[in-house]
Image: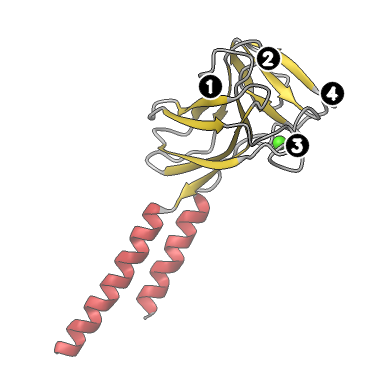
Amino acid sequence: MKKILATTTLALALAGGAQAATVVNGGFDGDFMGQFATLGNGSTTIGGWTVGGTSVDWINAYWQAADADGHSVDLSGGGPGSVSQVLTGLVSNMVYKVSFYLAGNPDQGGTKYINVQAAGASQIVYSFNNDGSNSKAAMGWVKRTYTFTATGPTATLSFSSLNNSAYGPALDNVSIAAVPVPAAGLLLGGVLGGLAALRRRKRA
Ligand SMILES: [Ca+2]
């Protein structure tokens, strides 16, 4: 059993060391206290994030946030926009899971589409059906995850609206965690190795 315990400790240490990657201001918090502010291409007004595309609306009191800070974004400001940031602290070949909360601007019904990509990895489009049951007071936020494999220590993570209107997908509460695949593999290997050793001992 000693060997298995040692392997477990090593696996946990590897998993812990690989979790240095963080999303800066994943809640889109800030000192903006109005209803909403339209931020154009290139804006860095929201700490940690850069606006791309046409523009986004930085939301405060206008609707319910997914988290406690009160702020979120509508990725279609005057037209389809995006927010992005450079993730740091990644480990090459490590798998990461980005979690985020998705809803849609309830001022216009229909389906909202958001494209998520870590540069160099696959783009994935997620949708949110604004079927009329949601409101500014009850946005119907849902948690979604995007998984990618790091190709180096940094990667630009972007969220883009595919709604060509002023009523886009709403985004909040972005976070990242390393997926402990190598650790799980080591742990499983250790357990299987231990079982094989026990079987060999029994046979002997
Ligand atoms: Ca927030």
User: Which of the numbered marks, if any, corresponds to residue 43?
Assistant: 2
The residue depicted at 68 percent of the width and 23 percent of the height is 107
- The quarter of the picture where residue 170 lies is top right
- The quarter of the picture where residue 77 lies is top right
Quadrant of the snapshot with the C terminus = bottom left
User: Between marks 1 and 4, how big is the CA–CA gap?
Assistant: 24 Å
Quadrant of the snapshot with the N terminus = bottom left
The residue depicted at 67 percent of the width and 36 percent of the height is 139
User: Which of the numbered marks, if any, corresponds to residue 34?
Assistant: 4
On the image, the x and y values in percent for residue 146 come to 46, 38
* Residue that badge 3 annotates: 137
Q: Taking 148 as reference, is 78 left or right?
A: right
User: Which of the numbered marks, if any, corresponds to residue 160?
Assistant: 1
- The quarter of the picture where residue 6 lies is bottom left
Q: Is residue 187 visible?
A: yes
* Label 1 environment density (alpha carbons within 10 Å; few <14, some 14–19, many ≥20): many
Residue 182 or residue 52, whichever sits in front = 52
